[in-house]
Amino acid sequence: MGRRTDPLRFGLIGVGRGARQLLAALTSGAHGRLVAAVDLAVETRESVARQYGVRTYASPTELLDDPEVEAVWVATPNQLHAEHAIAAMERGKHVIVSKPMAISLDETRAMIAVARRNGVLLLAGHTQSMAPSIRKMAEIVQSGELGRLGMLHTSHFTDWMYRPRQPAELDVALGGGPVFRQASHQVDIARSIAGSPVRSVRASVVQLDASRGAPGAYTAYLEFANGVPATVVYSGYGHFSMDNLLQRSSAGGSNSLGLFGFTLVTCELGDIRESANGLLVYDRDGCREIALPNEARGAAELHELYNAVRHAEALVHDGAWGQATLEVCLAINESARTRSEVHLPDGGPF
């Protein structure tokens, strides 16, 4: 029998703002085909059914009982990720779960155990580390083309705190606030490029507007097991937008990936940063640009799960990967609370 080439048949649980960014990849790509979706809002279900011609349900249980669905993308609020992912895996569905994977390490451990027990795959995705530019940056660094990696920096400034928000999105106890929602992107970027487990975290969080609940900014210093240091900086208070500095439209749309703020990688023989078209590499010969194709958000995750399910390739961004990223995010909060360095003896897979 030949290799299967048919796309994975997906159900989407939750069609909120973030999940809508995934619809292009789920409805037009070669690796996943949306067949069903769940949302509590009647108008959202009607819109998705009308626009994409898929079945819609009012509850995850209904979707998970649909025999055509073989994989699920969980894009519900953070505090529900574990519940919905576990329910899907208990019914034999493969799962992609949006960042953060969950809001506690107990939840991530339970998710990994359920995946293993049911013989299904769990992928932690929907982060900017999956952008073509970050993947290429990591490839260059790990190839040794520019010599030894010295250090890396990633920072972003947005108006995240003042966009329309549900209460849970600003409640740290429910996985709200920038440390859960935005550091997941930046930690994944740093981990992907460094190619090494995080050994320790020293961080501060900044609360400039108590009326918005969660602290809206943070600065973190990560040290990797290979000795590489990384600085991670974020503010969601909106006084300055990184889009202005990067000459990127903030209305980039669902197909716009990369340029999650400014990422600069320093290597022995050169530096790398993202550009509007891909990457800029600075070395002793000057500056050169590497153009990269655009890609629908979620396409890389669909491709990775597809290859794992259809062709038995190993997942990179599996449950252990997602757990390691969450561990760093939790360490940012813990370090800020205790004003001390937090050591991560395991640090996660590579």
Image (tube, rainbow, N blue to C red):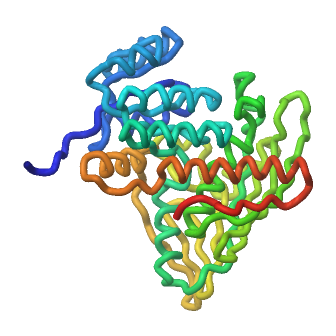
Asked whether 220 or 111 is in front, the reply is 111
Asked whether 157 or 31 is in front, the reply is 31
Residue found at the far bottom of this picture: 284
Q: Residue at x 54, y 90 (%)?
A: 285
Q: Residue at x 56, y 80 (%)?
A: 287
Residue found at the far top of this picture: 42
Q: Residue at x 46, y 59 (%)?
A: 132
Side of 13 where 63 appears, left or right: left
Rendering quarter of residue 110: top right
Tally of marks:
0
Residue 281: give x, y in percent of width and height: 55, 77
Asked whether 246 or 8 is in front, the reply is 8
Rendering quarter of residue 78: top right
Does residue 113 sit above or below 89 in this rendering? below
Does residue 275 sit above or below 30 in this rendering? below
Q: Residue at x 56, y 86 (%)?
A: 147
Residue 262: give x, y in percent of width and height: 66, 60
Side of 296 where 274 appears, left or right: right
Residue found at the far front of this picture: 117
Rendering quarter of residue 224: bottom right
Residue 310: give x, y in percent of width and height: 25, 47
Asked whether 160 or 71 is in front, the reply is 71
Residue 69: give x, y in percent of width and height: 31, 27
